[in-house]
Image: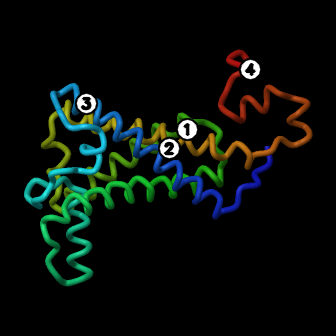
Amino acid sequence: MKNSMTPLGAVARGIAAGVVGTAAMDFLWYQRYKRGGGKSGFLKWEFSSGLCTWESAPAPALVGKRLVEGFLQGELPAERAALVNNIVHWMYGIGWGSLYGIVAGTIGPRNVYLGLPFGAGVWTSSYVLLPLARLYKPIWEYDVETLGKDLSAHLVYGLGTSAAFAGLSMTAYVPEARDTQHPEELLGALGMSPAAA
């Protein structure tokens, strides 16, 4: 298959795929929240309605607070916690999506299952970087259930991102003349077996 995707096209598709992956992960977290007795609707939950203190803010808000305060050399008011949380959360997912786009755009989106190691890598980076910033405890201080829930959410993010990227990239990979003579090679390149088709 011939790759006609430009680097800019790969980044743009990665950004869009990162949005899809982040939304998929958030939907999973929201379903868990509802099963745990949560009462808020999806939009209120998604946009952190009611978050108005830094003390109860999650890690994305605290990362954003540090960045803004460090850059502007001033204190960020607590009523901005929800906004900062959402901006950083979505930018993090989109940023990783753009990185995925660069890599997958180079090697070709051959297999959606590449989203699994990608999601695991994003999860691992959180447990390396956030403890260094003293926003998370070291990974060994978390129980297995907490780590498992967080890992599974990041695997959903990775699969959502890779599936969206593959879907958005279908027109960028054009079969060459020989591929039309051997459909099993085309299916293999897409990560499918001839039997599954």
The amino acid at mark 1 is Ala
- Judge depth for marks 1 and 3 and give the one in front: 3
Choose the circle earlier in sequence order: 4 or 2: 2
Residue at horizontal 44 percent and vertical 56 percent from the top: 94
Choose the circle earlier in sequence order: 2 or 3: 3
- The quarter holding residue 128 reads bottom left
Q: Are marks 2 and 1 in contact (CB under 8 Å)?
A: yes
Q: Secondary structure at mark 4?
A: loop
The amino acid at mark 2 is Thr
Q: Which mark is residue 194?
A: 4
User: Which residue lies under the disc numbered 3?
Assistant: 32
User: Which residue lies under the disc numbered 2?
Assistant: 161
Choose the circle earlier in sequence order: 1 or 3: 3
Location of residue 106 with respect to 197 vertically, above or below: below
Between the residue at mark 4 and the residue at mark 1, the CA separation in whole angstroms equals: 20 Å
Residue at horizontal 11 percent and vertical 61 percent from the top: 54
Residue at horizontal 50 percent and vertical 44 percent from the top: 161
Q: Which mark is residue 163?
A: 1
Q: Residues within 10 Å of mark 1 (few under 14, many from 20)?
A: many
Choose the circle earlier in sequence order: 4 or 1: 1
- Judge depth for marks 4 and 1 and give the one in front: 1
Rendered-image quadrant of the C terminus: top right
Between the residue at mark 1 and the residue at mark 3, the CA separation in whole angstroms equals: 23 Å
Between the residue at mark 4 and the residue at mark 3, the CA separation in whole angstroms equals: 37 Å
Q: Residue 193, image x and y in percent?
A: 69, 22
Looking at this rendering, what residue extends furthest in the top direction?
A: 195
- Judge depth for marks 4 and 2 and give the one in front: 2
Between the residue at mark 2 and the residue at mark 1, the CA separation in whole angstroms equals: 6 Å
Residue at horizontal 24 percent and vertical 43 percent from the top: 45
